Amino acid sequence: MAQGILRRYGEHLPITDRTPDLSLCEGSTPLIPLINLGRELSVELYAKFDGLNPTGSFKDRGMVLAVAKALEEGARSVVCASTGNTSASAAAYAARAGIPCFVVLPAGNVAMGKLAQAIAYGAKVVPIEDNFDVALDLARKGAEEMGMAIVNSVNPYRLMGQRSASWEICDELGDRPDWLVLPVGNAGNISAYREGFDYYSSLGRCSGLPRMVGVQASGSAPLALGREFPEPETVATAIRIGRPVNAEKAKKAVSDSGGTFLAVDDDEILKAQRLLAGRDGIFAEPASCAGVAGLMKLKEQGELPEGIRIVTVLTGNGLKDPDALLSRISPIEPVKAQWSVLEEIFRS
Ligand code: F0G
């Protein structure tokens, strides 16, 4: 039987006998060898496909614990700001737990699939005429003023639950990879991976930290480019964040691991998305492909050692944001339903 995070890794999480047994069977996502891309890059490459979680992103790993603990602590509702995935996940777990969920979103900058999810799961959706950073300020205010449980990554349980991805990788590979490459927005996930590897290392289950490479979109890259982004912009709306709340932890994770932050532009992200799908059959959302784009960039610059073992984290499912791809190709026109027409096309 499929187990969720609270059962699979309960002994490593702050669970008490009063913690509700919440689960949508999140986690236990596949570590898929990227055979073709890996060959092109001359590395042993794996994708941790967290887009296969129940709401289609890695957020479910931490959300299940955050909502379970909120229930245990007596919260009557949850609130979050989101670029889309957090809101989908919060809404799903709140629905399962039977409590209301309020989500504050940057209007016009959330992928349609994510918005549809939050609505379907019954959340109260509040789009604001500003960006994610301001939405987060407002969600925090809501939590403070009204006692709602905030389930953004300022909630420590979120990162605790998200550590489970690093444990799954180590359990499967028998150790940490040489490099871990992942997209960075609010910088919670990279911090959670760091804490997860540290913890597993303390149990003797892996040998320290992998070299951590955090990739940002060049239009919203405060960590990679070391300056402020008051008006972040990128096709990868999930990581359209100018003021990451976990910036300090993330910087430490990268420097302690001998890693680096990188910026990739929107064209590089979309090219990586097509490459990942076209070469290895995996459709991930644009933000998730920032890691692959980063690897391609390092390869071009001659900074990717050959033969090393790399895990890149595919944080969200491509089906959440089909517009990012479809709006950039010319429309595919229908043809006459005649074999002669099709035959010509098939033979060309
Ligand atoms: N990838 C995807 C698909 C995301 O949705 C996010 C963040 C990230 C990467 C970056 O993770 O913030 O921990 O550095 N999405 C948040 C949201 C902000 O609201 O869904 P991070």
Image: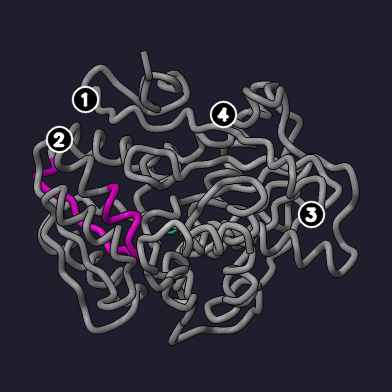
Question: On the picture, is 103 further left or further right than 297?
Answer: left
* Residue 189 pos. (x, y %): 51, 51
Question: On the picture, is 150 further left or further right than 306?
Answer: left
Magenta span has 78?
yes
Residue type at mark 2: give it: Ala
Number of numbered callouts drawn: 4
- Give the CA separation, mark 1 to mark 3: 39 Å
Q: Vertically, is 170 above or below 259?
A: above
User: Which image quarter holds the C terminus?
Assistant: bottom right
Residue underneath mark 4: 168
Residue type at mark 4: give it: Glu
* Residue 270 pos. (x, y %): 57, 69
Instruction: Give the class, few, some or many, for how many residues have Cα within 10 Å of label 2's Cα (few <14, many ≥20).
Output: some
- Helix, strand or loop status at disc 1: loop
Of residues 206 and 128, the one drawn nearer to the viewer in this rendering:
128
- Give the CA separation, mark 2 to mark 4: 26 Å
Q: Vertically, is 231 above or below 265?
A: below
As drawn, the label of residue 20 is: 1
* Residue 158 pos. (x, y %): 38, 44
Residue underneath mark 2: 97
As drawn, the label of residue 258 is: 3
